[in-house]
Image (tube, rainbow, N blue to C red):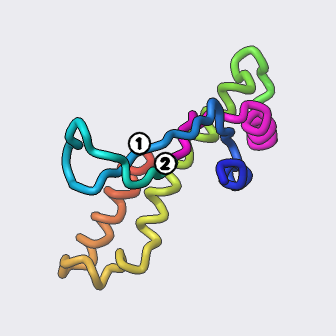
Amino acid sequence: MAKDFEKTLDYHLLDELEILAKPHYQRRGKPKLGDEVSYYTYHIQGNLVENETVINIHRNQAGRFILATNLLDEEKWTNDMILHEYKEQQTTKRGFRFIKDPLFFASRVFLKNTKRIMALAMIMTLALMVS
């Protein structure tokens, strides 16, 4: 049964499997000295270990990026710096997604003056660009 469960795991293996017998008695609580065991239940105990070969294969597949830029100075802009700058854009893009959200339409904002609504949108856009 443990081997069937191990087949369902994608990134882990079972290690040091043991079968433990747990005795059960007629009465509840701590058994008395002369009490006899009425039946046993058996439990499987083991350790869950990462399957390093599968994890490394998936890391290598997910770790590829195509870096295209018009910044040609390789001493100033290394590949790691360009990748870092690209990944930093994701936080700003999530913020702009908020502005495009239908719940954030001008009719939902409780500002009566059109100029104030435009000013609020501009301030939020500037705040996103700064972050």
Number of numbered discs overlaid on the protein picture: 2
Residue at image location 65% in from the left, 32% down from the top: 15
Read off the residue under disc 1. Answer: 131
Which of the image's four quarters has the N terminus?
bottom right
Is 74 inside the magenta-drawn segment? no
User: Residue 100, percent across and down?
Assistant: 46, 71
* Residue 107 seen in this snapshot: yes
* Image-based side of 91 in relation to 14, left or right: left
Q: Callout 2: helix, strand or loop?
A: helix
Residue at image location 23% in from the left, 36% down from the top: 33
Is 50 inside the magenta-drawn segment? yes
User: Residue 25, percent across and down?
Assistant: 31, 51
Q: Nearer the viewer, residue 114 or 60?
A: 60
Q: Earlier in the sequence, mark 2 or mark 1?
A: 2
Please tell me how crowded label 2 is: few (under 14), some (14-19), or many (20+) other residues with Cα within 10 Å: few
Give residue 91's mark.
2
Instruction: Identify residue type, mark 2.
Output: Thr
